[in-house]
Image (cartoon, rainbow, N blue to C red):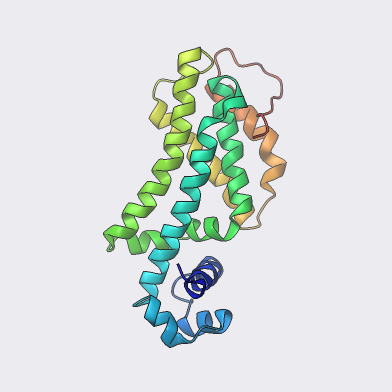
Amino acid sequence: MSKKKEAILRAATVLFANNGYRQTSIAELSRLTGVAEGTIFYHFKNKEEIFLSVLKSVKKRLDHAIHKAGGLENAGTGLEKALAVVTVYLGLCGEMQDEFLMLQRHYPYQISRRNPECRTLLEAITAGFLDLFETALHAGQADGSIDVESTRKTAMILYAMTDGIARLQTYHIYDSGALHCELMRVCRRMLAVDAPAGPSHAPVV
């Protein structure tokens, strides 16, 4: 990928995240990058193609992060792995604030209603995180540290709960870090066999 194309995608990510899709203009993208509008249209046929390219780039980064987190070799039991995944997700939200803000807006899902490629990318991103949670839950079932009936449904609940906490941070409503210990406690009580009543902390990953 050329340096100009990379610059366009980086700037577009910031604009889509902070301004939304409709309010992001090619003129502003040109001003922000110093790349002529004609050059932008040389690389991308329209704004929607720019958005899809940004989404592909985000998915690639998240795939790498999920693969890196997939082992969690030092996490211990399946329960500790599941708690570590929660921590990993919140960490990614902090590291990739613009990307997560873009994903948490409504417009990507509006576009996905008429654009199958967009829908496939969004579904793949969600499935990646669900699979990461579910793998930890399976491990916990196998080693006896987790007691749940449906690993997939429980993975969805964990994902939705963690993403909800992350949104408080993304939208500057509340510091999600201040909720971390309580979130770990809630997750442990929800998942663990004979969970202790006292506070618990997920391992640092």
**Residue at 63% over, 34% down:** 183
Residue 172 in the image: state x and y as whole percent. 66, 57
On screen, residue 189 above or below 117: above
Residue 144 in the image: state x and y as whole percent. 50, 12
**Residue at 71% over, 20% down:** 198
Q: Nearer the viewer, residue 33 or 152?
A: 33
Residue 15 in the image: state x and y as whole percent. 53, 71
> How many labels sit on residues?
0
Q: Nearer the viewer, residue 41 or 96?
A: 41
On screen, residue 38 above or below 180: below
**Residue at 43% over, 60% down:** 55
Task: Give the quarter of the figure containing the C terminus.
Answer: top right
Q: Is residue 19 visible?
A: no
Task: Give the quarter of the figure containing the N terminus.
Answer: bottom left
Say which quarter of the image contains residue 193.
Answer: top right
On screen, residue 128 above or below 167: above
Residue 194 in the image: state x and y as whole percent. 58, 12
In this rendering, would 168 be left or right of 7?
A: right
Q: Is residue 85 visible?
A: yes
Say which quarter of the image contains residue 184.
Answer: top right
Residue furthest out toward the front: 2
Q: Nearer the viewer, residue 71 or 155?
A: 71
On screen, residue 64 above or below 181: below
**Residue at 41% over, 65% down:** 53
